[in-house]
Amino acid sequence: MLPVNSIELKDYRLWLLGLATCLAVIYFTLVWRLDNADLLGNSVLFIGAVAMILRDRWQTLTLSSSTISTGLGSAIVGVLLLRSQGYLSESFLLLFPLLAALGLAFLASGISGLKQYRKELLILMFLGLPKLLLPILFDPTVLTAKFSALVLWYSGFEVERYGYYIQLGDRAVEVFQGCSGIEGISYLTALAGLFIMMFPLGIFARWAALILAGIIAFLVNGFRVALLAHFVYSAQPDAFDYWHHGTGSFIFSMLSVAIFGGICWVFLQRQTPHEPEVSP
């Protein structure tokens, strides 16, 4: 027969698990309603990683929340539920998992036990904050236009650049902010954040992964813009639409992810100690 304290603790864990499941269902329903496939895929990946980490150490978590922490956690969860009834914006959904996890952490372990969930909170922070903060802090539109013009010049084209415009012959292409590469930079930076939180890496490897993620996304997008300018110059509207809005744009996204994945594999190989060979 189990002691009363063990039964109460088990019920408390089940209650927290049920609340977390309800919040996850609400969140994925909201993302589905917003019809944002990129955010949906990222959310499955990041929240799944958090769920795996918590599953491995579920029984070792210290659950002890004070009245103030319980009230604070309940307030955060309540605000999220009320806000979910109104107008949905991408910025709200980008912060929803982090705020929900923070509220659950306050309910579960209080302010003093928040450090137990440092890795999980950082992972969810990388899910939303890069896409929210990077466009405010950094606008690579001019750099993208410069790099794409340089690629075309090295490819043998007579190219001129005026600010955001790339001119080939009597035709010109304007590089808008949507084509600047900031979306790809934000996406790959978020993946880099997930990578450095999931695997044991040194300080140098962590910073290198974050920096290289942004560089790779910028370079791949620069080549894409140069290709689009070439299609405008050669009067190929169908090819332009395919590589701008169609499947071609996803090919460049997958290319950047594949290149970054290869770099992550190299980092893991360098971090993994090799077993010494045993002579017979």
Image (spheres, rainbow, N blue to C red):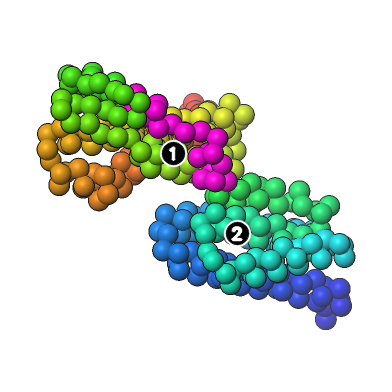
Residue 255 forms part of the magenta stretch: no
In the foreground, 117 or 163: 163
Amino acid type of disc 1?
A: Ile
* Residue under the point 79% across and 62% down: 72
Q: Where in the figure is residue 119, as x and y percent of width and height?
A: 66, 47
Crowd band around label 2 with a 10 angstrom C-alpha radius: few (<14), some (14–19), many (20+): many
Q: CA distance from mark 1 to mark 2?
A: 22 Å
Crowd band around label 1 with a 10 angstrom C-alpha radius: few (<14), some (14–19), many (20+): many
* Residue under the point 70% across and 47% down: 118
For residue 131, above or below residue 2: above
* Circles 1 and 2: CB atoms closer than 8 Å: no
In the foreground, 153 or 74: 153
In this picture, residue 153 sits left or right of residue 34: left
Q: How many marks?
A: 2
* Residue under the point 46% across and 44% down: 187
Query: The magenta stretch spans which residues?
Result: 129-147
Q: Where in the figure is residue 80, as x and y percent of width and height?
A: 65, 65
| Sequence-wise first label, 1 or 2 | 2
Q: Is residue 73 visible?
A: yes
Mark 1, residue position: 182
Mark 2, residue position: 96
* Residue under the point 56% across and 41% down: 133
Q: Is residue 10 visible?
A: no
In this picture, residue 7 sits left or right of residue 39: right
In this picture, residue 15 sits left or right of residue 47: right
Q: Where in the figure is residue 111, as x and y percent of width and height?
A: 82, 54
Amino acid type of disc 2?
A: Phe
